[in-house]
Image: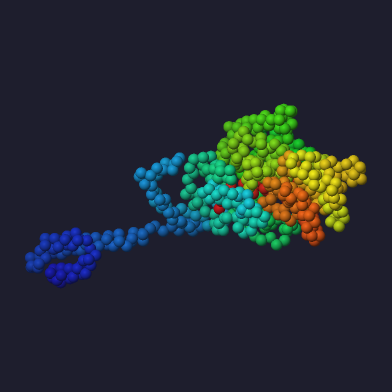
Amino acid sequence: MSQMSAFHLWRRRTTRTKHLRPTAMIDYEKAVARCLGWGGGAGAGGWRSLLLLVALVASTAALYAFFSSTLRVSAWFLVPPPSNSSPEEFVLLPSPPPTHRHTRPPLGRHPASTPPPTEVPVSTASPSLIAPSPSPAEGAYDPKTSPLVPDGPCLTPSPGFLPVSTVTPPSVAPLPPPRVGDDAMSVSTSKNITKAAFATKTPSTGVSNAAEVNATGVAEVPNHWRETDLQLIHAKKEIAGAPVVLHDPDLYAPLFRNVSVFKKSYKMMERILKVYIYEDGPKPLCHTPHLDGIYASEGWFMKLMEENTRFVVKDPNKAHLFYLPYSSRQLRTHLYVAGSRSMQPLSIFLRDYVNSISAKYPFWNRTRGADHFLVACHDWATYTTNLHEDLRKNTIKVVCNADVSEGVFVRGKDVSLAETYVRTPNSPRKAIGGRPASRRSILAFFAGQMHGRVRPILLRYWRGRDRDMRIYEVLPDEIAAKMSYIEHMKSSKFCICPMGYEVNSPRIVEAIYYDCVPVIIANNFVLPFEEVLDWGAFSVVVAEKDIPKLKQILLGISGRRYVRMQTNVRRLRKHFLWNDKPVKYDLFHMILHSIWYNRLNHYSL
């Protein structure tokens, strides 16, 4: 083929795509042709054919580059994942929005250039209990909404549990009223725990490892995710997918809001939870349990916790919770100045105690006390935390005085401690039990001191007014000689439990011990274990304003329903008993479970 014919053939082919080539490229080709003298001529030599070939290659390369840019061909050449990454899937993380030159960055953060998308391996294998990898989220929780919830600084309620707190800053959830169903926990149903979520989170400033905002508005911002955080989030995810429990010989379903969720949560607590107990603190104010009287609950918990080997660890780095082992009763006994009417010495001791711990160890400062808890039953327990802001706002307070109206006790974060009156520490279960429903001749019974605002109203309407309503200030000697206080409770259908100076009363647990249906009169009182127990199944809650209608309310309960309620009280009793050696589902474990459960509320899935 002559040089001229070859040129014209090439010319016809390239002309067809002329509209696809840049003008500069077309001018370049014409210039090459003129230089080579491609008008024909016998003088053209083999070197011209070589130059023609070079021009063809250059034109083709330019054409390819144009198509590559236009059609995004470069994407085809992404390197595929390595063959040994089968257990990992790669996720393309979107780039954050660009930062404008003149935009002021958020307070406390430095402007940063927009990084390109990065591929982060996400584990698809089932998470182990040792190192699960869900990520703590921030959020707020709600007292009567969905249970176990938080997100971004928030809380997330557990499925089937009572809602916990109501605050949703960047993102969290809480517990609802009475019964909580499938919506009890706003969590992801995915079975994979993605480490990618942690890889892309960058803590701002702060001192918390759980990035959250609790119901009081206190934010926890993690400096880094710890192994213990991942384990708690893994537990919460497992609880969210709890299998349905059709029958369990150890748990009576009618007592619970959601027995399936409670069983799974309890099981995860047994498998995962570790508690570190500070050895600091002078005796007898710390590490000295008092085991009798109406404040015995804090002493029994301290005794059994410090003797425990299943949950307690010596290495604080393995702990999910930290226990402040002081006694509110001992503070009252040794620090209160008689007649001063001041709690200041008690509050100062607690402030200094916490400050010494935060100065000596890094654990308090890491979360500002959010993973620490105290257990105190004295009426003053909540008030003595006021001189230390983090202790009051962040720490999990396990207290008998669970009054939400005063702004100190936070439903869904703090825990209502059952107040137990232990008369004989060597035999805390002495004389429990009562008569069956058919042998209870008294409709309602109460006898007690005139403490607080409610009891005087109760006596004003019902003392000596009705034979069915046995309401006394102090049980008269002539009556007590025939039937003791305890025998009255064992012989009554309903035991009236009005608040005293504070909302709590040991009569609630006493009624349960003697198989008497408790009638609770205390506005704003958070009942013990209300996040898991359905108190409507075994008790009657009466508003203070309805005291004049008390008998009418009680007679409105049918005989069949009463028998069912009394049966439930009897089945409930084991959950409120102290044992020298803790037994599964007893009072010690129920308290510990509530602390565990409320701590899980700080994490969002």
Q: Between residues 131 and 396, which one lies in front from this camera angle?
A: 396
Q: Is residue 86 above or below residue 411?
A: below
> Does residue 393 appear in this view?
yes
Label tally: 0
| Quadrant of the rendered image containing residue 3 | bottom left
Q: Is residue 375 left or right of residue 435?
A: left
Instruction: Give the colour scheme of this rendering.
Output: rainbow
Q: Position of residue 344 (x, y in %)?
A: 66, 30
Residue drawn at x 11%, y 65% as measured from the top left: 38
Q: Identify the image quadrant of residue 561.
A: bottom right
- Point out residue 318 in the picture as x, y percentages from the top left corner: 61, 43
Residue drawn at x 72%, y 55% is 536
**Viewer-side residue, 283 vs 345:** 345
Rendering coords of residue 584 (x, y %): 73, 50
Q: Residue at x 80, y 44 (%)?
A: 459
Say which residue appears at 78% left-offset and 58% top-offset. 556
Image position, residue 17 (x, y; %): 23, 67
Task: Evaluate whether residue 135 shows in this view.
Answer: no
Viewer-nearest residue: 581 or 555: 555
- Say whether residue 547 is left or right of residue 148: right
Q: Quarter holding the N terminus?
A: bottom left
Q: In this picture, is 237 found above or below 429? A: below
Q: Is 562 above or below relative to 326?
A: below
